[in-house]
Image (spheres, grey):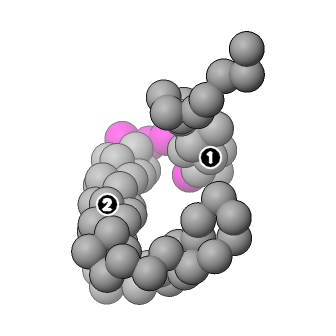
Amino acid sequence: MPKSKLNLPVWLTPQGEPVSCIDKIKVLNENLEEIRELAQDAFEDAVLMGCDESQFRDVIKKLSETIVNPYKKVNK
């Protein structure tokens, strides 16, 4: 089965400026590729085990919403 190409984003700073450090962009892109590969493997397992494709996709979308920023500053 051919692997679909991941469209990599232009990574932005919180101020909306493009991230300019090539090393940071490389790490971000590699991380995104790894996440995609893991999600693809999990998706294929789910389908092979008879799970509903649309349900799996919904679960993955909801999972992304549970990611927490541990570095977010709290206003005191």
**Mark number displayed over residue 61:** 1
Q: Is residue 61 left or right of residue 34?
A: right
Q: Quadrant of residue 26?
A: bottom left
> Is residue 18 positioned above or below 56 on the image?
below
Q: Where's residue 70, x and y in %?
A: 48, 28
Q: Check if residue 58 falls in the magenta segment.
A: no
Q: Position of residue 14 (x, y in %)?
A: 65, 59
Say whether residue 51 is magenta.
Answer: yes
User: Does residue 28 appear in this view?
Assistant: yes
Q: How many marks?
A: 2
* Residue at position x 62%, y 46% in the image: 61
* Image mark for residue 31: 2
**In the rendered image of this protein, does residue 12 appear above or below residue 4?**
above
> Badge 2 local density, few (<14 within 10 Å), some, or many (20+)?
few
Residue at 31 percent across and 60 percent down: it is 31
Real-space Cα separation, disc 2 to disc 1, in angstroms: 17 Å
Amino acid tagged 2: Asn
Amino acid type at circle 1 is Lys
Q: Quadrant of the C terminus?
A: top right
Q: Main secondary structure of the magenta part?
A: loop
Q: Quadrant of the N terminus?
A: bottom left
**Sequence-wise first label, 2 or 1:** 2
Dot 1: what SS? Answer: helix
- Magenta stretch, residue numbers: 49-53
